[in-house]
Image (cartoon, helix red, strand yellow):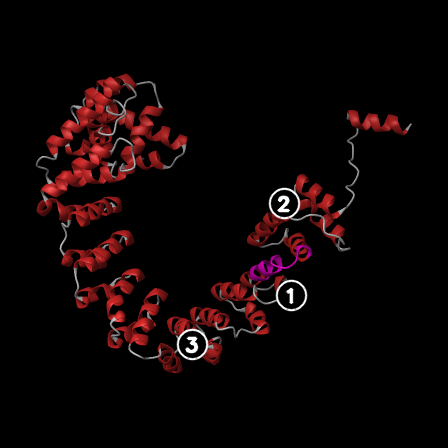
Amino acid sequence: MTDDLTTGRRADRERAMAFLRDAATVPEAAQAALGGLTHPRHWLALDSAVRSEWWVEGWTSVLRSETPLALALSACDRDGRNRERATTLLTRDDLLPVLAIRATDWVAPVRDTALRLLAELLADPAPHRFQVLLTMAAAMRDRSRAAELISLVGAALHRFPDRLLEPALSCRDRNARRHTVQIAVEAGLLPTERLLRAAVEDPDQIVAVRCAEAAAALTEDAAALLPLLRSPVPTIRALALTRPALDGDAALCAPRLDDRARVVRETAHLGLRRAGLDPAEHYRVALRVQATPARIAGLAETGTREDAPFAQAALEDPRPAVRAEAVRTLHTLGADDPDTLVAMLHDPSGRVLRQVRRALRDHPVPEEKLWPLIAAGLPPATRRAGQRLLLDQGPWIRLRADLLLIEDVDPAIRTVAATDVQAWLQTQQYLPPVPQDMAGLVDDAAGALNERTLKGLRFILGLRSPAPQSQPGTPRHWFLKWRRK
């Protein structure tokens, strides 16, 4: 139920608030409901929701109740006097999030009371309490009155790093870990070994990269950074390989030539070139054994047009990732053939079709080769690729494709066609001569076009709109009948 506070829908918020108000006056229900508020966004949404309902039936009984949930609701009340009175009692562990929120209150007496209590709590904080306050401070770090709260949390981390640093780095909330790393790195609180462990193990990429960069700045030993090669983040793996590459250490760089990330491969290329070796030769030898997406991509990054046969052979590979990379490599090397690309538009993989479509943008393809691609009965991916290619053609081909497909059985194709007709109207001027079949296509698609779009098309195409039909019995009907007499 507490998740309804954060959906952004008014009905959900009102339902959640009604549930919390009813629970606030019953001790057992209040404790259970309080346990459901587990994330900073819940507490921040609760604070906003209480103030949005300036009066509801039963609110007075909530303010008079002494349950912890009632106290939390009172501390979020619109009346600053109620907030200040409740704030003095927010020292329980389960109410610390509300105390942190009140430390950013817009009313100075409320804010000062909360900051005084927080200063007392953070003078000698327990790790679990510090985790809660750190999480809330990180969630409110962009508020205009959050500076003092941020300062209190940072000062506690500086005073008790041995006690608080590990709990802070193990917070489930990624914003809290980011804030901790920022403070710890700037103050030099983390040793190189701990930074390396966080760079490899932390699931948040921002935390991992920040720790890796800090570790690289603290040590001159390139071997100390080698554990970073196990990181799932390409930027970190490239960082670990940078110093060996600059030193021309081919033994360390060669195994990374087949890395799945381009930034890592290019760093390894640098290492081999520094050692006087040609990285393209590695890919030529490896592709004779087995084609992989990384090897084909590496050949595109280091090879020449003469290496195109390696990629052409990979076009027949049963793996879509290999075929898609082969298409991209041929295009990069300038060795792709438009006829081959058009034939590959029947490939069953959408991944391959996307690469083919990108490659065909640089090759003029006769429209007669594209129209068969949208024929009924072909795979949806092929028809969608054909539609996109037709939309990249001239204005009349584009409009003709839209009108033919605007009532297609495939909802994705229908949506693209309907949207593109609107875009065509906004970007095209009258373009003589108008193809003769346009009038019939507009009439056939009239049922799928709204009145404004239909009028716009007929105006640009120079077509006469049909005379409006009057309904019998209406004033217009009698007027036209009188006029004809």
Provide the secondary structure element on which disc 2 rests. Answer: helix
Q: Is residue 54 left or right of residue 25?
A: right
Sequence-wise first label, 3 or 2: 3
How far across and down, in percent of the image, does residue 202 sit? 23, 54
Q: Which residue does the numbered mark 3 point to in the structure image? A: 303
Residue nearest the observer in this picture, 247 or 51: 247
Mark linked to residue 462: none
How far across and down, in percent of the image, does residue 425 sit? 65, 46
Provide the secondary structure element on which disc 3 rests. Answer: loop
**Label 3 with label 1: CB-CB less than 8 Å:** no
Q: Which residue does the numbered mark 2 point to in the structure image? A: 426
Residue nearest the observer in this picture, 59 or 252: 252
- For the residues marked 3 and 2, what is the alpha-carbon distance in whole angstroms? 44 Å
Whether residue 385 is in magenta: the answer is yes
Q: Which residue does the numbered mark 1 point to in the structure image? A: 372
| Type of secondary structure dominating the magenta stretch | helix
Please state the extent of the stretch shown in magenta in the rendering: 384-396
**Label 1 with label 2: CB-CB less than 8 Å:** no
- For the residues marked 1 and 2, what is the alpha-carbon distance in whole angstroms? 28 Å
Q: Quadrant of residue 280?
A: bottom left
